[in-house]
Image (spheres, helix red, strand yellow):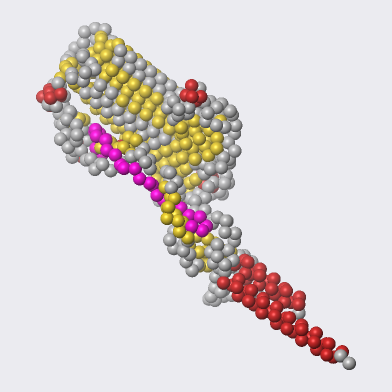
Amino acid sequence: MKQKFLWSLCILSLFISSVLPANANEKPEMQTSIWDGSIAQGFSDGTGSEEDPYLIKSAQELAFFERSVNEGNSYENMYITLAANIRLNDEEFMFDVDTGLVKVTDGEHTAYFGTGIEGHEGGNTYFDETPSVKGTWYETDSSDTKTVYGGNLNEWTPIGDYKRPYDNRFRGHFIGNTHIISGLFIHTENNMVGLFGYAYDAKIEQLEIQNSLICGGSYTGSIVGYANSRFNGVTDHCINNGIVIGINCVGGIAGSGDSVYNCHNLGVTIGRNHVGGIIGEGYASDDYNNGLVYGKSCVGGIIGKGTMHIGGNSGTVYGEDMVGGIIGCGVAWQCFHMGKVIGNTDVGGIAGNCNDADIIDSVYQPHISQCYSLGSVQGKTNVGGIVGNNTSLFTEDCYNAGSVEGNKNIGGIGGYASSVKTCYNVGNVIGNELIGAIIGYVPAEHSVEHCYYLAENGAVETGIGGCAAAFKGYIAGINEEAMKLAQTYVGFTFDEKYWKFDPDIHYEYPVLDRRGVEHGGHVFNQKNTDPRALVKEGTCTEPAIYYYTCLCKAVGYETFTVEPAHQIYKNANDLYHWDECHRCKLQENHAAHVWDKGTVTLVPTHKTDGEFTYICTECTQHTIIPIPKEALPAVENTPSSEEKTPSVPQATPKGSIHPLFFVAIGIGVGLLIFYTFITVRQIRKAKNTHTP
């Protein structure tokens, strides 16, 4: 009897322990999983048609797609849709302007990734004087000690590989559905590097790359390394908010692309030659850069080398030669610059150098036209508010209201330029040699017609600093009152498509309105926090600053601020939920979870365990308690489908004691007392029997 009692007590204890919560320190199941490096066997769903595209719902399925393309399946004329956000790593990748390094950390391990550039803020003496080595790991941000990153980084292989057979290119239609791929990490010396490496006659759209570090060779971008499909829109409505590092032809969106439309760069782009915030080399339209761009030659806020139509820059562009707020080497029209450009030779608010003939295509506008600059331009030689060096093409219908500063050949419109017409300048121009309010130096006999400048700006006394020969046309210094009158601007076309005065904005000089007829005039953003108008990122203590802009991106003159505020999101652990600021990590409003009654989310069988799930009624936190198969009564026959689900004792969430525990203790004590009573009676009876 004693053995039977003990066995029953063990079975009861096993059952109770199985339905009670596990260790309170154990975390519940993650809501968003991080890639474990494994590869799925196929897509979640779909047949690949436009009506029924292949669906990608996990990192494993994205990895399957990559392997499939790189093994020769080009998906030509097929459709693939991203159906969820993807996290490839949980590290944070943070660029530091002061050192030029990328800090990589998972919260436990930290190392610093070299980018090959010097720091620019001056707080770190070592890396301000010694550029880091591209692709090298550093143990600290203040020495050249080399190490490796101690955490676990999943490295991505680009989709489409140029080193393999020629058909290993992506040729389908990838639709991101505005989903985000974060934690993308690539570290290679190969060319054609990005989420996609090589795309041909393909289209990639509605996708954002966030918190990522991509380091490759030439033709490197966040979305795609090399893509060609002229006029078809290789990339469309894509955003980069990561760090892209390469050699030649490096872009925040694409290393090289024939057609990059409606894309936005918020991240950091670093390269050597042909470096742009959107693309390194190619053609783009309706794109915007608000990130940092670093390079040496042919460096632009939008494009390093190529052709740009409709775009804007409010980011900072660093370079050495041929540096522009929009384009380093090439042509641009209907563009604006509101950021900062810093270079040495051939530096312009819109374009650095326009004299390379192989960038001109007869299909495109072969001039710098209908552009304006409100930002700053700094250089040494051939520095202009609109263009640094342009002697081959026209610069027309442009104006500058920003600051221009340099040493030699410094102009409000062009630094070293000719063939300039219908332009004006009201910005400050500062230099040492050959300084002009319109052009610093005119190298040949070309027309400079109908250009005007504010004669009262105090920095420049002449429209042209110097010229090799006499020029034709007319340049005039005008006082402020005359600059506000349409009749002053002889040669200008004042209509809804080009020049106009706009009484609705805080700017009293002529403005360009490229879409006035089609869109019925300027439509202002009502001082909303449109990221395309961001000037300075806000913090919890410092206000964000935005431009007051027209939605057509044609004007933007007055800044406004948004007061500092915490950016709160909900966070939780096993025991509590609270509000937390994602910027400064301030935590408030801690409260214990309020669990619901719970539900059976997986019915146990005689072969498998079940699950009982509790959800907090105040937040989305949940906890899962296993229901062991041993808890079910033994039956001879399998229940029919009409029978009810077996009754399962309800468990309580982690951190509390289940009521069944006390029931079990009571039963055990009762059985023990009963067993003791019976045993004592038997002993007394036996004693009485043997008593003489």
The outermost residue toward the top is 469
Write the residue at 27% across / 38% down.
560
Q: In which quarter of the image is residue 507?
A: top left
Q: Which quadrant of the rendered structure holds the C terminus?
A: bottom right
Residue at 48%, 46% in the rendered image: 86
Residue 370 visible in the shown view: yes
Query: Hey, which residue is sitting farthest left in the picture?
Result: 487
Residue 489: x and y, percent?
14, 23
Q: Give the range drawn in magenta.
A: 549-576
Location of residue 360 in the rendering, given as x and y in whole percent from the top left corner? 33, 22
- In this view, the residue farthest toward the front is 692
Q: Can residue 78 be seen in this view?
A: no
Quadrant holding the N terminus: bottom right
Residue at image position (30%, 37%) is 546
Q: Is residue 560 magenta?
A: yes
Q: Where is residue 208 in the image (x, y as percent from the top left)?
A: 42, 41
Closer to the camera in the image, 241 or 405: 405
Rendered residue at 66%/72% (across/down): 12
- On the image, which quarter does residue 273 sit in? top left
Quarter assignment of residue 165: top right
